[in-house]
Image (cartoon, grey):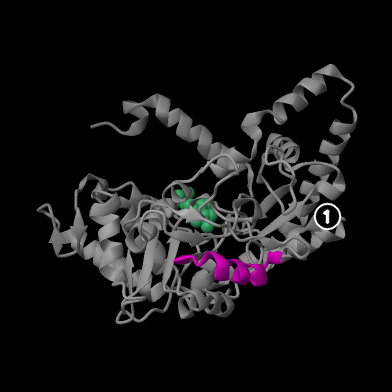
Amino acid sequence: DYGLREADPDVRAIIDKEKQRQFRSLELIASENFTSRAVMEAVGSCLTNKYSEGLPGKRYYGGNEYIDELETLCQERALSAFSLDGKKWGVNVQPLSGSPANFAVYTAILNPHDRIMGLDLPHGGHLSHGFMTPKRRVSGTSIYFESMPYRLDESTGILDYEMLEKTANLFRPKLIIAGASAYPRDFDYPRLRKIADAVGAFLMMDMAHISGLVAASVLANPFEYCDIVTTTSHKSLRGPRGGMIFFKKDPVLGVDLESSINNAVFPGLQGGPHNHTIGGLAVCLKHAKSPEFKAYQNQVVSNCRALASRLTELGHTLVSGGSDNHLVLVDLRPMGIDGARVEKILDMASITLNKNSVPGDKSALVPGGIRIGSPAMTTRAFTEKEFVAVADFIHEGVQITLEAKKSVASSKLQDFMNVVTAPDFNLMDKVLD
Ligand code: PLP
């Protein structure tokens, strides 16, 4: 039995290159982070060898005594990380990632063609919240359920709760989905609860991006108002790639969420859980209770504020005027440039972030903004001072992109611009990322 370097030098070489890329670049993708060595050790362990369909104590395979112990520990730590009372809340830690976690919830509580409302993708929502274009039902969520997205108020960049309320009253959704992939503000959960109650809808929060901030009480607590809370584990939470679903134990709208959600995950949608991921998740959730984790999450937010205010000083326009959380959304249109070109130029300088649509964008092909997140570089010990420098670098990149755009007379440069705006740099590759 050989190690990777001997068994497969090709794959080893690719991993080494990726490690170098991660090491040398300024990692500013808001949904990414660097997990700990301890988490990676669990993820790379023998736990990957074991089948354990079912739940602790109720498995379809033998040999699960330690896997039961592990999954139970992971569940306990998940509830504890979010200060939840195990009599009132339960959790399923088996979803393979964020989108499957969300789809398991829909499968559990909806019938095909039931109506749902989530934040529109071009306004910061996630694909799995029901995204569709006028021509195409893009996500499985919009294929199997009837989706009526809600949006931001374009003049403020803040979620338009009033319009959501009006639309919900007409559309009568069975589920309202809160949460976003590119929204720099916190959510008004009491207001969302009121809207859901008025139409008899379930309220689910997908806190994938902000779960670390929620665990550290840096942002409002969705558990006080929502029936179901889903999350990925690899973003601000700093765990392995995976997902979790938290559900109220008491029936909601006549539905036993515990059994319906557990059954939707398995056997509804998945087979054997990824026990190596559950091991890594347990490690990350232990860390989430530590004072260092809380300090880290506070630093994530302070760094993001420093980034936001420096960008503003440099004349950039931020969607909603700033940020409450770990990300800023820069509207580059007033600068006369788009997010696709800026992303490409910054990538050449090992500054990794993503182009993003901003409210009012006419074209999804060349979105007008960029999304910048602070979690990953905060893990690498950046403080406010370094994030001011990051803002300066980004600004410089924008200036260089603008100059390049102005001098498109050179045919070589024209070719380059054609490449950077080619269809594979359109919004969908961010979406399908
Ligand atoms: N939910 C939100 C809000 C997200 O931002 C994302 C991913 O970026 C997901 C769900 C999906 O997670 P995954 O990529 O693990 O399926």
Q: Nearer the viewer, residue 73 or 44?
A: 73
Q: Residue under circle 1? A: 316
> What predominant SS class does the magenta segment belong to?
helix
Q: Along the horizontal axis of the image, is 179 left or right of 155? A: left
Q: Is residue 173 magenta?
A: yes
Q: Is residue 171 magenta?
A: yes
Q: How many numbered marks are there?
A: 1
Q: Where is residue 108, by image quadrant?
A: bottom left
- Would you place residue 131 above or below residue 88 in this image? above
Quarter of the figure that contains the N terminus: top left
Q: Along the horizontal axis of the image, is 424 left or right of 66? A: right
Which residues are the magenta region?
Answer: 158-175
At numbered mark 1, what does the secondary structure look like: helix, strand or loop? loop
Can residue 226 be seen in the rendering of this structure? yes
Q: Residue furthest front?
A: 170
What amino acid is at disc 1? His
Q: Which residue appears at 36% of the width and 75% of the height?
A: 253
Q: Position of residue 44 (x, y in %)?
A: 33, 46
Q: Nearer the viewer, residue 48 or 141?
A: 141
Q: Which residue appears at 65% of the width and 34% of the height?
A: 425
- Would you place residue 195 above or below residue 238 in this image? below
Q: Which residue appears at 68% of the width and 28% of the height?
A: 422
- Would you place residue 101 above or below residue 196 in this image? above
Q: Along the horizontal axis of the image, is 97 left or right of 249? A: right
Q: Position of residue 134 (x, y in %)?
A: 60, 43
Q: Which residue appears at 46% of the width and 76% of the height?
A: 223
Q: Position of residue 202 (x, y in %)?
A: 43, 71
Q: Position of residue 355 (x, y in %)?
A: 68, 44
